[in-house]
Every structure is written in C-alpha cells, then in structure tokens.
Amino acid sequence: MKKLITGRFSTLFGVLGLYVLLSTIIRIVLLFWSVKDLDLNFINIIRAFFTGFLFDVTMGSLFLSLYAFYLLILPKRWIGSLFDKCFIYFYLILIFIIIYFSLLAEIPFWDEFGVRFNFIAVDYLIYTYEVVENINQSYPLPVIGVVLVGLIIATFVLFKRSNIFRNTFSEKSPFRNRFTHAVPVLAIAVILGLVMKNKQADFSNNLVVNELGKNGAFSFVTAFKSNELDYETFYPKLPEKDAYSIVKSDLLQQNQKYTTTKYNDISRITTGNQEQRPNIILIAIESFSADFLTEFGNKDHLTSNYDQLSNESIFFTNLYATGTRTVRGMEALTLFVPPTPGNSIVRRPNNQNLFSVSTIVKSKNYQPYFIYGGDGYFDNMNTFFGGQGFDIVDRDRGNPLSDDIKTQRFAIPDNEVKFENAWGICDEDLYKQSIKYADKSAKANKPFFQFVMTTSNHKPYTFPAGKIDLPQGDRNAAVKYTDYALGKFIADAKTKPWFKNTVFVIVADHCASSAGKWEINIDRHHIPAIIYNLPQPPKRIDRLTSQIDLIPTLFGYLGWNYNTSLYGKDINQMKAGDERAFIGNYRTLGMLKGNIFTQIDDRKRLKQFNVSGNEKQTLSELKTKDQGLAAKTISYYQTASVRFKNGKMKVR
C-alpha cells in the first residue's frame, strides 16, 4: 500500500481515493437532504452505501483508465519529462473539471427531481443555449467557474504538499512494476464497467434509498446509452390479441362504435349531438401543480385569477398528469396516449403524421397553431408539432424546420418582446402572440385551435418587474406572475369580437416537482384543469381523470361527431368505476384506478399498491394482486408502445 502512495501511481490512486470520498460525502448530503422521504431501514441504507461504493469505484476507475494505460506504456526514460508533466497535468485538470462539476451539479438536480442524473440531464446536453443560459441566470457562471478553479487549485496544492506529484514524476518504475499496478485498475474498470448496472441499485420500494445507491456520473452514462426503451424487450407482456381485446373493451364509450372488426384496430366513430365549433385556445402552463391553488389548501394566495376562473368553468379537481416533463404533457394533450417508456413520442424520430388532436380539428376546418415563447427546436417541439400540421409561432434562433415539415413558421419579432430569459419570452408577451394570431384567424373567418405553451414558471423564475408583490427568483413569485399574466390575457381577450365564440382549456403540463419517497409519487402528478367560456353553467368534475381525457371531454361538451384512434376518453361518457389515470416516468409506468395503483417497470416486474391519503399520499404494497387490473395496465402500455413502434399511430 505504501508503494502505491509513494510511487509512480500515487497520483492515480490519490485521485481515485478522493473521488470515492467526495462521492460518499455527496451521498451523505443527499441522505440528510431527503430524510423525510427516506425509508429508515438500517440494512437497506447500508446496502445502498455499499452498492454506491461499488459504483463510485467503477466510475472512478473508468475516469482514470486512460491515465492508467498511459502510465503503463510510457517509456521509463520519459518519466518526469516535460511531455510527461504536461500530459498528466492536462489530464488531471480535465478530470477534476468533470468530477467537481458533476458532483456539484448533483445537488441542484436532486433538489429539482429527487433523483440522480437521468435522461433529463442527457436531453439537456443537446440544448446548450437554453441550459447554459438557465444555469447562468440561476447560478451565475462566473461564480461556478471561480468555484471550480478554486477546487482544482486546492487539490493541486494538496497533492503537491503531500508529495504525490513528486513521487509520480520521480520514480522511474520498470515496466514489470507498472504492469502490476496498471492492469488491476484497468481490469476493475472493464469488469465492473460491464457487470455494474443501474438496476442493481433498485432493490427497494423507496426511491430515495435506490437513488442513494447510485452514482450520478454512472447514471448519466446509463441514461445516455438507453435513452429509449423497447417495451417488448423490457416490460411484462400479454399475448397480442389478449392485450388488444382488453383495451378495445375498455376504450369503447357509450356513444362510439368500432369501424372495423380487426383485432388490432382501435379506430372508432364518436357520435355527438348539436355540434358546436367555437375557437379553442389550449394553454399548457409550465409546472403548475394543483397544490398552488387555494382549492387544494394553499394559503399563499398565489392564483387568484385561476381560482376565480375555476368558479366560472368546468373544473377538473381530480386530474393527473401522465409524466414529469413538458414533452410528456404535450404528448398527453395532443396524442391522448399513455406515457410510453423511454423518451416521449414528442422527442422520438419518425413521429410525423400521427393521429392527433390536429387530425380531428383539421377535419373540422380549424387551423392549428403551436405558440411557444422559446425556440421550438428545444425538445424537438417544432418537428413534432409541425409534423402534425400545426403552424409554428416561436422565438426562432436560426434552427430551421426540416424540409419534410410542410407548415408555416412565424418568428416572434424583437419589438414584440418586453422581457425574455433563458427559456423564452414572459407569459404576457406570449399571450399577446396568441391574441395576434387569433385576430389574424378571425379576420380570415377561419376557426382556430391554439396550443399555447408558457415558460415563466420555470427556473430562473424571472419576469417583468413591478407586476406582483413578490421578489424575482422565487418559485412562488413565478407562480403568482404566471397567474397575473393569465388574468390579464383573459381580460384582453374579452375585448375581442372572437371571445364569445372561443373556449379556453387551461391545464398544467406537469407538476413543479416529482421528487418523493416512491418510484412514482402519485400526489406529485395532481394538476388542475379548467374548460372556460363554454355556453353552460359552471361545474366541478371530482371524478378521477387522466390528462389524456381532457380534450376528448371537451369534444364531448361540444357535441362533436368525429373519428378517433386515440386512448383518451370523454369522462362524461365513462360508467361509474371506469375512471383511471395513467402515470409514469422514464422507466416506471402505472395506472391508478380507485385506490389501487398498478406499476410495471423495465425489469418486467409488476407491483400493486394501496393508495391512501389525499394530497400527501401513502403507498403500501399489496401481497395479493388484482390480476384484472394487472392485465389492463399491461395491455394499455403494451398496445400503445407497439402501435407507435409499428407505425399504427400514423394517419391512414
């Protein structure tokens, strides 16, 4: 051991030991950070730390494998030369930047999502402008740079004072000695790199315990390699005909009939009554959790406008988002499909010309618009919406639509923007774009459908000054500003001649946070939704509703006759007891029905939980499974995944 500390390999083992130590410290910090959601089982915690140690050694060895190989092959006569020092110092600076940045970044990521790095972190790497600007506005880049430089300098000073560097450059070890030191490191990197899998840390029902047993950098690499999951390979299945039989029986509403007798065709004719064709403005509010509303116990009076509108609307009080990201909300509100595993369909290739809300409204001669205050290149939004026939209104930053997207794109001009941050223009400016294009459609006597995506309720939580009585940079302030802008938008819309013939659907894309004790925290998917300005009395819908059911329910209120190949249903056409909500994340998928939550994951496991409590829900695993609910959950996710994979979601 002394030879390792004082010899040629002293720097390598010093860096490896430091990385494992710092990773353990981060693990302890995260443990205390989330102690309220922790399953205080001492054996499980010990196991998580042991598993985490193995992941830390694996990742540290992989970081240093190139360095170990260099130490092995560099000729003895070059040890301590200028080339040797330049290579090692450069390599160490690069490694320390990666190590310190990744370890520090884990803390805000955990605060936001309650997990180690996952596919979200991978996705964000693609969109450098938004992410770098968001980091700079939330955590100023100069400060981050100073901290990183300070940590690297401190580490170099520590290594120099402990003579680690001197030993590295002074001992001219023969190849045989270097071989006995380098090969074990390389072997550990290769063997553990192949053997260790992130799923080995998922041994309990407690999300925090499982995530503590992981390593952030290793989780990032895992997510990068498996950013899509094939349902048929990784998830529990039923025979295809059985799966479709269950789904088709459950999908059929009282006012529908199937168009064919093919076992795998879910196309249905929906019969309405006294059809109305108002303009429709769908507003998806960023990160707008139900618990921001007074209705659900909030005491901070953040949403006075939404609260007032809910009293004048069809108000969905028991509605659940399908996922935890904006693209999942978009998927649910346009494709009305359960959240298929891996990436949202919005972000997948070959997602054009799908049967969607656009297919239905265009059959009624509507012009669909997607209006977004940022650059719709982010998260593949423009390609997805353009591929469904939406005209695009966004903050164009020079990312053109592909040649096969045959829709119009309108850039939001600088002179129509009063405030902008990393994610886009403020909600007030965005709503002005909605009114602008509503005026344009009304002038052309063309009914319109707008999908308006807000961004103000997002870090760095900045907005125009002087609008509300809370300071910038705070989540509550962003919520209050978002609500202020919504109230102003409705007031401005009321002055327009098209207002009386326009229905507003105002819903969250997802909740503000998904972190919690469970793999899927059901209460962190509870979102509000209203349908405003319908020509009928206000009403509360307290029945369990999925995000994918919102627009089909609107079509029901409008009495529409239309064809559908979608999974969403009109809540008013469901029999009592048929209500269900689909809730998932990247790997784990579930269906809530009554007080039973059925959960499946990419290890082909199926679990069921009894759900108790209201806003703060508790899950207790059931020993005896309801096989009917299990089969129904599998059949929905299996058929939805396979239909997209095989092109059956395409418009025929």
Image (cartoon, rainbow, N blue to C red):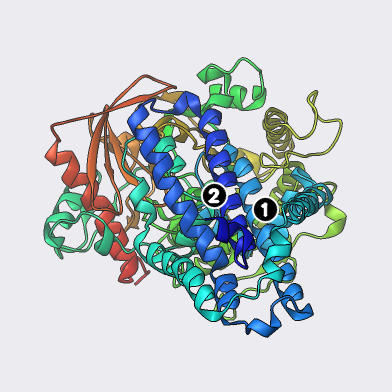
Q: CA distance from mark 1 to mark 2?
A: 15 Å
Foreground label between 1 and 2: 2
**Of the image marks 1 and 2, the number of the one nearer the N terminus:** 2
How many residues crowd mark 1 within 10 Å: few (<14), some (14–19), many (20+)?
Answer: some
State the image quarter where residue 174 is shown.
bottom right
239 and 43: which is toward the camera: 43
The residue pinned by badge 1 equals 101
91 and 591: which is toward the camera: 91
Q: Please report contact status of discs 1 and 2: CB closer than 8 Å, yes or no.
A: no
- The answer, for residue 184, to whether it is visible in the render is yes
**Percent of width and height locating residue 30:** 54, 35
Indicate the amino acid at tag 2: Val
344 and 571: which is toward the camera: 344
The residue pinned by badge 2 equals 20
Element under disc 2: helix
Asked if residue 364 is positioned above or below residue 137 in the image, the reply reads: below
- The answer, for residue 557, to whether it is visible in the render is no
State the image quarter where residue 367 is shown.
bottom right
520 and 287: which is toward the camera: 520
Left or right for 198, reference 479 = left
